[in-house]
Amino acid sequence: MESTKNKTLENPNYIPTPKEALEIQRELRLKVIKQNAFNEIKSIAGVDLAQVSNGKQLVCGIIVFSYPELEEIERVSTIVSEQFPYIPGLLAFREGPAIIETYKQIKKPPDLLMVDGHGIAHPRGIGIASHIGVILDRPSIGVAKKRLYGNYEEPRENQKSWTPLISKNGENIGAVLRTRKGTKPVFVSIGHKIDLKTSVKITLKCTKGYRIPDPTRKADKFVAELKNSSFD
């Protein structure tokens, strides 16, 4: 029988059943590289996605920035029909095809993807940042606004403090990072081809006065503008 993983790698738009999706996650998890596997980061792409008000389509926006200057290089977007239902823990199968289709429009592939979501900080160790990183074979970081999985102690109130996010088996799966004093922390995790220390360092360098780092913050704003202009 053909591997479900191979179906996904050869055709990222392949729509699995929920049972197949769980098997794909188990197989893709083995592909995640948790060490730095790049020479230099000169560009970062912020990735965000939202459901359109009609409930049947998804809009994705990707903005590529120079790094560390964070000057915009290009932005691309796509609107696709939703093919996979919303199932907690299987978000990548609902949103992944839209991200991949949008990514194909980028003129020059970025050195790093910063995704509004989780990487290995996921019940099965393969959140959307890791899933997309493996499929596209690009270094990636997950930066999420809320915890999905794991336990942690609240970081100190001062800026740049962080505490580890720990799985049920005691593995450090992320960083609970306070990017700005007086705000809630964000949840940073390895996506693919990067380590946690570097993920935290890059997230902080991309945070310019706001709680959310610029690549995903501006991608989120871009997606909101796309929704308003296309569907109002």
Image (cartoon, rainbow, N blue to C red):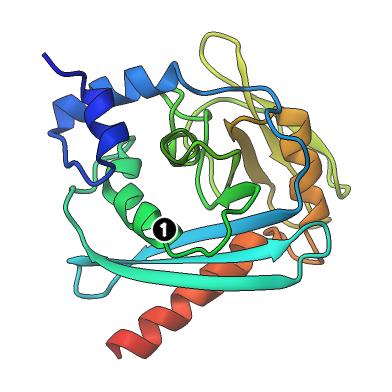
Vertical side of 131 occupied by 151: above or below? above
- Where does the image place residue 220, in percent across and percent down from the top left? 53, 68
Question: Can residue 109 be seen here?
Answer: yes
The front one of 108 and 54 is: 108
Query: Mark 1 falls on what kind of element?
Result: loop
Using the rendered view, name the quadrant where residue 192 is placed: top right
Residue 52, position in %: x, y? 28, 72
Q: Amino acid at mark 1?
A: Lys
Question: For the view shown, which residue lies furthest in the top direction?
Answer: 169
49 with respect to 116 (left or right): left
Name the quarter where the C terminus is drawn. bottom left
Q: Look at 48% across and 60% down and name the residue there.
A: 48
Instruction: Identify the residue at image location x=60%, y=72%.
Output: 74
Q: Position of residue 144 (x, y in %)?
A: 56, 47
Out of 96 and 111, give the one closest to the viewer. Answer: 111
Res 231 quadrant in image: bottom left
**Residue at the (42%, 71%) spot, across then down:** 77
Q: Is residue 91 left or right of residue 138?
A: left
Residue 214 appears in the figure: no
Name the residue tied to disc 1. 104
Residue 200 point in image, percent of width and height: 76, 39
- Name the quadrant of the N terminus: top left
